[in-house]
Image (cartoon, rainbow, N blue to C red):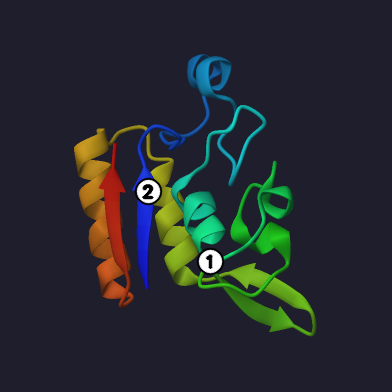
């Protein structure tokens, strides 16, 4: 599958007082309308905005998707792809070009395509 990340609504760089004030907390989808990379991907898989709103990670949705793995009957955990993507997305030491390159390579390692627009 090919995923597209819109830089205009992409929430990245982790939480800090300054970034939270300007862009809201780092979530799949926050109240301000910004989404981490996985939130944007999950929307493209057909998961509704209402489901990801104010959730911190894919497992919090308790739904099967590319970024979760079933951990017990009707319970899901974040998979390796998901955890690594969150680590890269929230790493404050990376600039955006480094972050994008790392995410593109991570997705490629998992047989997925990722592009950034806007």
Residue 93 point in image, percent of width and height: 30, 33
Above/below status of 100 relative to 8: below
Helix, strand or loop under label 2: strand
What residue is drawn where x is 42% and y is 36%? 12
Q: Which mark is residue 11?
A: none
User: Which residue carries the number 2 mark?
Assistant: 5
Q: Is residue 69 left or right of residue 96?
A: right
Q: Is residue 30 left or right of residue 118?
A: right
**Looking at the image, which is closer to me, 116 or 84?**
116
Above/below status of 97 relative to 109: above
Residue 46 point in image, percent of width and height: 59, 64
Above/below status of 4 relative to 18: below
Where, by quadrant of the figure, is residue 10 drawn? top left
Q: Which mark is residue 45?
A: 1
What residue is drawn where x is 73% and y is 67%? 62
Residue 37 point in image, percent of width and height: 44, 49
Q: CA distance from mark 1 to mark 2?
A: 13 Å
Helix, strand or loop under label 1: loop
Q: Is residue 61 left or right of residue 34?
A: right
């Amino acid at each position: 599958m090919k995923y597209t990340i819109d830089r205009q609504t992409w929430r990245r760089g982790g939480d800090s007082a300054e970034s939270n004030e300007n862009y809201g907390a780092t979530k799949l989808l926050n109240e301000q309308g910004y989404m981490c990379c996985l939130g944007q991907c999950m929307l493209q898989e057909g998961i509704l905005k209402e489901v990801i709103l104010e959730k911190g990670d894919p497992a919090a949705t308790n739904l099967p998707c590319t970024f979760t793995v079933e951990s017990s009957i009707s319970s899901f955990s974040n998979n390796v792809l998901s955890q690594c993507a969150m680590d890269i997305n929230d790493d404050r030491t990376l600039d955006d070009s480094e972050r994008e390159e790392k995410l593109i390579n991570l997705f490629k390692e998992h047989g997925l395509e990722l592009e950034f627009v806007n």
